[in-house]
Image (cartoon, grey):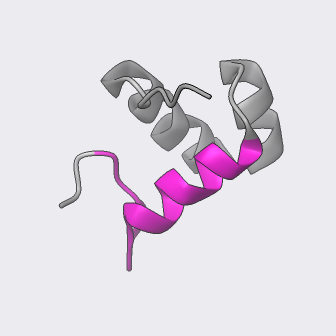
Amino acid sequence: MSYKHLRPEEKHYIEIELKKGIPQNQIAKSLGRNQSSLSRELSRNKDQRGYRFGAI
């Protein structure tokens, strides 16, 4: 099984959609990604203000 990282434009899309209140599963589906991939991305890059794809 091959693992593919999320591209920066996908991460930006996730940030925008979350701010709109779109559910995680719908975002994952629209990106053609597994919901668990999105969930892992969010847990890695969330802070007190929410998901920020540029956050370190």
Q: Position of residue 28 (x, y in %)?
A: 71, 34
Q: Position of residue 54 (x, y in %)?
A: 23, 47
What residue span does the magenta drawing correspond to?
A: 35-53
Q: Residue at x 55, y 57 (%)?
A: 40
Residue farthest along the bottom direction in this orientation: 48
Q: Is residue 38 above or below residue 46?
A: above
Q: Tell me if 50 is positioned left or right of 29 in this view.
A: left
Is residue 56 magenta-colored?
no
Residue 22 in sight in this render: no
Is residue 42 magenta-colored?
yes
In the rendered picture of this protein, how many numbered marks are placed on residues? 0
Q: Residue at x 56, y 48 (%)?
A: 19
Q: Tell me if 8 is positioned left or right of 10 in this view.
A: left
Residue farthest along the left direction in this orientation: 56
Quadrant in which the N terminus is drawn: top right
Residue farthest along the front direction in this orientation: 1
Q: Residue at x 54, y 25 (%)?
A: 2
Quadrant in which the C terminus is drawn: bottom left
Q: Position of residue 26 (x, y in %)?
A: 81, 36
Q: Residue at x 50, y 36 (%)?
A: 16
Tell me which corner region of the image, top left, top right, bottom left or bottom right, holds residue 6. Answer: top left
Tell me which corner region of the image, top left, top right, bottom left or bottom right, holds residue 35. Answer: top right
